[in-house]
């Protein structure tokens, strides 16, 4: 069975260029932890500029999580 990958996107915000934008990361189920009591999703991106760096995203800042 292949590894399950997920795309995690933050809520949209206005960037430095004045346009609506959002951050997105790719992670696998093995490196995503849900902190129910703290209301955070904790993960380490597999791709991009922040590869391998721990991310803590509050539930209310998550726009979408979908399987690739």
Image (cartoon, rainbow, N blue to C red):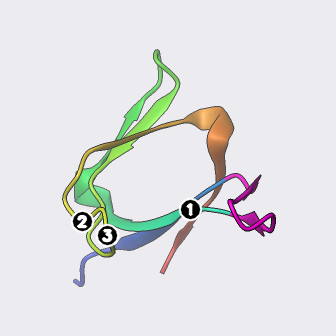
Where residue 48 sits in the image (x, y, percent)? 33, 75
Which range is magenta?
11-21
Q: Residues within 10 Å of mark 3 (few under 14, many from 20)?
A: few
Q: Is residue 28 left or right of residue 52?
A: right
Q: Is residue 58 left or right of residue 33?
A: right
Q: 19 above or below 39?
A: below
Where residue 15 sits in the image (x, y, percent)? 70, 59
> In the image shown, does 11 or 41 lie closer to the viewer?
11
Q: 11 above or below 33?
A: below
- Disc 2 on helix, strand or loop? loop
Query: What residue did someone put label 2 on?
Result: 51
Query: What residue did someone put label 3 on?
Result: 49
What residue is shown at x 26% (from left), y 54% (from top)? 44
- Disc 1 on helix, strand or loop? loop
Q: Earlier in the sequence, mark 2 or mark 1?
A: 1
- Image quadrant in which you'd find residue 51: bottom left
Q: Is residue 20 magenta?
A: yes
Q: Earlier in the sequence, mark 1 or mark 3?
A: 1
Viewer-nearest of discs 3 and 2? 3
Q: Residues within 10 Å of mark 2 (few under 14, many from 20)?
A: few
Q: Which mark is residue 23?
A: 1
Q: Is residue 47 left or right of residue 39?
A: left
Q: Is residue 65 left or right of residue 68?
A: right
Measure the C-alpha gap from mark 3 to mark 2.
6 Å
> In the image shown, does 53 or 38 lie closer to the viewer?
53
What residue is shown at x 23% (from left), y 57% (from top)? 30
Q: Is residue 35 magenta?
A: no
- Disc 3 on helix, strand or loop? loop
Q: Are marks 3 and 2 in contact (CB under 8 Å)?
A: yes
Measure the C-alpha gap from mark 1 to mark 3.
11 Å
Q: 10 above or below 33?
A: below
């Amino acid at each position: 069975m292949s590894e399950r990958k997920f795309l995690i996107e933050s809520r949209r915000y206005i960037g430095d260029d004045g346009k609506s934008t959002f951050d997105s990361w790719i992670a696998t189920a093995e490196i995503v932890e849900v902190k129910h009591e703290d209301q955070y999703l904790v993960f380490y991106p597999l791709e991009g500029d922040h590869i391998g760096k721990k991310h803590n995203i509050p539930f209310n800042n998550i726009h979408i999580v979908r399987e690739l």
